[in-house]
Image (cartoon, helix red, strand yellow):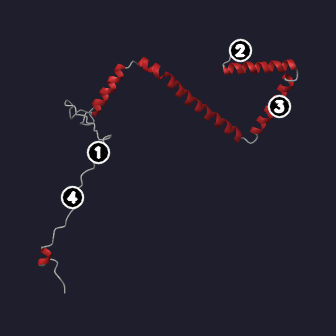
């Protein structure tokens, strides 16, 4: 037996309506973050103005605050306040660049097959020459040691007497 889907029986017409869940209310906002900031739109902003990017007036408010901050600050005072940190940052960037260039030069020298061994040979031969000419006699040794100690004191910033 087939039933026509368009036909209805009395039991189907008296069916109870489907109960839906009541709409849940939004949870209470945390008082620490419940505050909202509203920025009123400026009344004199024109719709056709090419500088006004949004109708809310935020750009004008931001530019006015930056302009006021710029007006009350003196450029000389700003430079004096930021001079040491800027010089320190510039020196740090310069040091990093010098170290990178130095490491690249050393890597290029190391890539030459005999260059590192030749530099070692030159260094050892200079050390032998220096030792023979300056460190054999005691008076020459004293001059070398005193010169090194003076350089160390100058490097450390001590008083040289």
In the picture, the disc for residue 160 is 2
**Which residue is at the far right?**
137
Q: Earlier in the sequence, mark 1 or mark 3?
A: 1
The image quadrant of residue 73 is top left
Task: Determine which residue is flagged by label 3.
Answer: 125
In the picture, the disc for residue 22 is 4
Query: Where is residue 143 shown, x and y percent of the image?
Result: 81, 18
**Which residue is at the far bottom?**
1
Describe the element under mark 4 as helix, strand or loop: loop
Label 2, label 4: how far apart the Cα atoms are: 89 Å
Asked if residue 80 shows in the view, the reply is: yes
Q: In this rendering, which labeled residue sits more in front, label 1 or label 2? A: 1
99 or 140, nearer to the observer = 140
Q: Earlier in the sequence, mark 4 or mark 1?
A: 4
155 or 112, nearer to the observer = 155
Task: Determine which residue is flagged by label 1.
Answer: 29
Q: In this rendering, which labeled residue sits more in front, label 1 or label 3? A: 1
Residue at 16%, 80% in the rendered image: 4
Describe the element under mark 3 as helix, strand or loop: helix
Q: Earlier in the sequence, mark 2 or mark 4?
A: 4
Query: Where is residue 1 shown, x and y percent of the image?
Result: 19, 87
Q: Earlier in the sequence, mark 4 or mark 3?
A: 4
Please give left or right for residue 92 compared with residue 57 in the image: right
106 or 44, nearer to the observer = 44
Query: Where is residue 61 shown, x and y percent of the image?
Result: 28, 30
The image quadrant of residue 127 is top right
């Amino acid at each position: 037996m087939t039933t026509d889907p368009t036909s209805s029986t009395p039991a189907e017409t008296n069916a109870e309506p489907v109960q839906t869940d009541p709409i849940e209310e939004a949870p209470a906002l945390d008082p620490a973050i419940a505050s909202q900031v509203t920025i009123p739109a400026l009344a004199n902003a024109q719709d056709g103005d090419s500088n006004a990017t949004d109708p809310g007036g935020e750009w004008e408010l931001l530019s006015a605050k930056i302009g006021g901050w710029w007006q009350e600050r003196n450029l000389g005072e700003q430079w004096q306040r930021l001079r040491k940190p800027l010089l320190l940052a510039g020196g740090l960037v310069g040091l990093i660049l010098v170290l990178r260039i130095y490491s690249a030069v050393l890597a290029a020298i190391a890539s030459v097959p005999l260059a590192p061994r030749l530099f070692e040979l030159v260094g050892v031969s200079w050390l032998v020459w220096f030792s023979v000419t300056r460190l054999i006699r005691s008076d020459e040794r004293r001059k070398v040691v005193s010169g090194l100690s003076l350089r160390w004191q100058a490097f450390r910033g001590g008083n040289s007497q």
